[in-house]
Image (tube, grey):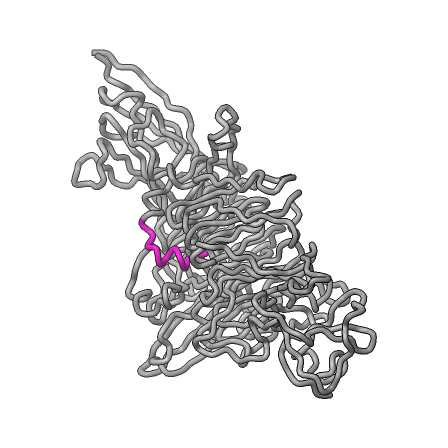
Amino acid sequence: MSTSKLVLPVAGFTDGLNTEASILNVMPSEFMNGTINVELLSNGSARRRRGVDFIGLSSTGNYMHTVRSGNASAETYIESPAVTSVKLAAPNGNIVKRVVVDINNSFEIFEATSSGLKNCDVPYGTLARTTDSHSNQKFFDMDYAYSGKRLYFAGRHTKPGYLYVDADNVTLAATYIDVLIRDTDATAANKRVSNNSKWYECIDAHTATAADEPGVGANWKVYWVQLDGPIPTSTAAWSGTTVYTSTIIKQYDKNTTPGATDTYPSTTAFFASRLWLAGDPKTPNSVYFSKTIVGTRDIEKFYQFADPFDSNDPNVVDSDGGVIQIQGAGVITKLLTIGTVLLVCTTNGIWEVRGASDIFKATEYQVSKVLNDAVLGVGSAVAVDQEAIVFGSASVWLTEINSNITDIGAGGTDFFKLDTDKIETIYDAIPRSDKASARAIYSQSEHKVWYFFNSGETAFTNSYGAKGQPSYFTDVLSLDTRFTEAAVNVDPNAPKRSVKGAFTQYTYADGGKDGEPYIAYPFVTEEIPAANSQVVVGTNTVVDDSGNLVVTTEAQSSGDAVHAVAMQRTTSGSVVTIKKSFITLNSDTLKDWASDVTYAKNYESKIITGTTTGGDLFHKKMPTYIFFVFKKVETGVLDTNDVDTNAGSCFVRTAFQFATNTTSSKYSGQTQIYKPDRYNYAVAGAGLDGFSHTWAKHRVRGRGNIMQVTLEGEGAKDFHIVGWSQQFYRKDD
């Protein structure tokens, strides 16, 4: 019997997580059969994920700030904040940066500057919704749409409206809107009048008084809407004694106070220079679109300008508003603008709305169903540059928007599965209720989608989950969106391209328990510095000559960053206290909640590689060495014990014959393989040796037909692996 030497080439992890790959691979494929808390970088290397930590320095250690406190029996459900970062144009032309938090039946406004969020404990401003929102809104997500000067919002128990920069050029104000639609089942006389060389249409039946004289009276806007263009010759002058009627009705009235059973559109979009609203469970198939918005009056006009019952002028014009009925939609969960297409995501699939020549007009558009998979929540779809990624009930999808459509009925949006051959096992295991409450966000600078979800039912979610809408996240699926593409043109019925994305999975220390912080709502904003870090020597914080804490702040990034609002629920007797804080998900502390010793926790980081057979299963292999290449993580900054403040560590295990633990005798113990070159301590303050990478040669003990490698982190120490190569001998016949 002879032996032959085999060397398998260096492998990285460019394919990401793949739980569905065959266990009988010929070579160590460039994917991870299992991974937890490892970040995949664009070059195929992998490192420990960064830690979760509080934003803002607290000299007292009190990072969580009280939202409210009250009777525990009244706090039936989990708080569900909804956060967005926005840049709004002020009246003077300046750009105002704000972070808006929907919480406790209010909009809390925080100032975002180049140095980070200001006053994390005290909002820059608060806009209470005392008469504009029911308190039940706190159990549901608010949805936002941005149009440059306005941030539109919609929520299940909140009247629709928008935020804008007030006349002082710094403060945000809120305006709530009527949603005016035309009652196409009714005709009425005395509905249009002229007054002071302008003309008006009645929107609320009434007997005329001086107070409601159109354009003049104190309450005229309650009953009239001003119309544009020349006054028709047949239009009668307003009279103070006339009974006026209307075919324009208020589908949603801004002057009413929402009750517990009142519902409103729960999703919004800005598309084709119009405001779009949908998702009211009372009208589940209805999609409302406004008139083309030129002035603020147009925002409320969700109807055709001309009276369809007027024989002289019954026609729809391009700029009109209206209502689209999508029969069979189920419940509309999300409106999403992708270039020249509006996606209407529902519990029965996805429809697209588009116009001819990619220009939506009220006179010329089409509505087509483009996907059968259900979209269960408002956070399940996210725009990714000029495409969308949708986390459906069954699969994860990537769109391909067919642009430059010249004919109605041509083209349409294609969807391609991303998870079927990658993470199907993980994705299928997420409970349906947790997919409904999950949230996807996109970091353009990282080219990654972060899908936050709860991995399963817990005592906390069972106790406080609000109607399938708990805002409590334990896991993330991170998807690198730098796809590879291959055209497929042979079969016109075949998919137009194959796509490949790289997944990794993060888990977070199981918060949510009474008294512990938990991730409640992620958002993306321009880079905000992570928690200011107190300089500590031993167990003592360092102060300057004036007694002020000495802190370090992470450098700014030119791109965006992923942050979140963290919540905490604490019960003491009959009193429950709800607190919140801003957090970063990119802290180099490599602990979760590291700034507060009460909550600080280490987390596990692990990579399980694909299996190695060397080309066959018949012969046993005797591995000799595995070579690992690491990027050095040390900073050269030493503590009082001459240990680098960012020391690295990585252990390796090897397993033969599909062994999963040491009882099999085919599963090795841990061996340290991260061994950077020794420091030159003679170099004052540095200790770096001039090399950016280091490598390790690991001697493998044992043999078998198939082998798998596991890499594991240690405590709060970092590692960054570039790739690995393997050498072994095969016994030949």
Look at the picture and state if 692 lies above or below 646.
Answer: above
Q: Which of 546 and 342 is in front in this view?
A: 342
* Near-viewer residue (47 or 365): 365
Location of residue 523 in the rendering, given as x and y in whole percent from the top left corner = 52, 58
Q: Position of residue 585 (x, y in %)?
A: 48, 56
Query: To which quarter of the image does residue 178 belong?
Result: bottom right
- Which quarter of the rendering shows the C terminus? top left
Tell me where residue 107 sits by quadrant.
bottom right
Taking 239 as reference, is 519 above or below it?
above
Q: Which residue is drawn at 40% across and 66% down?
A: 517
| Residue in the picture at 35% in, 75% down | 76
Q: Residue furthest right?
A: 197
Please indicate, yes or no, whether residue 552 appears anywhere in the rendered image: no
Residue at x 72%, y 61% (from the top left corner): 313
Magenta span contains residue 460? no
Depth check: 439 or 666 in front?
Answer: 439
Residue sitting at the far front = 311
Please say whether residue 434 is one of the residues in the magenta stretch: yes
**Residue in the picture at 71% in, 85% down:** 218
Left or right position of 643 against 107: left
Of 369 and 344, nearer the camera is 369
Does residue 530 sit above or below 704 in this rendering?
Answer: below
Specify the quadrant that holds the N terminus.
top left
Where residue 69 appears, as percent x and y from the top left, is: 42, 81
Region of the chain picked out in magenta, as a range = 429-442
Badge count: 0
- For residue 149, above or below residue 424: below
Q: Residue 294's x, y, as percent? A: 73, 62
Residue 670 visible to an observer of this rendering: yes
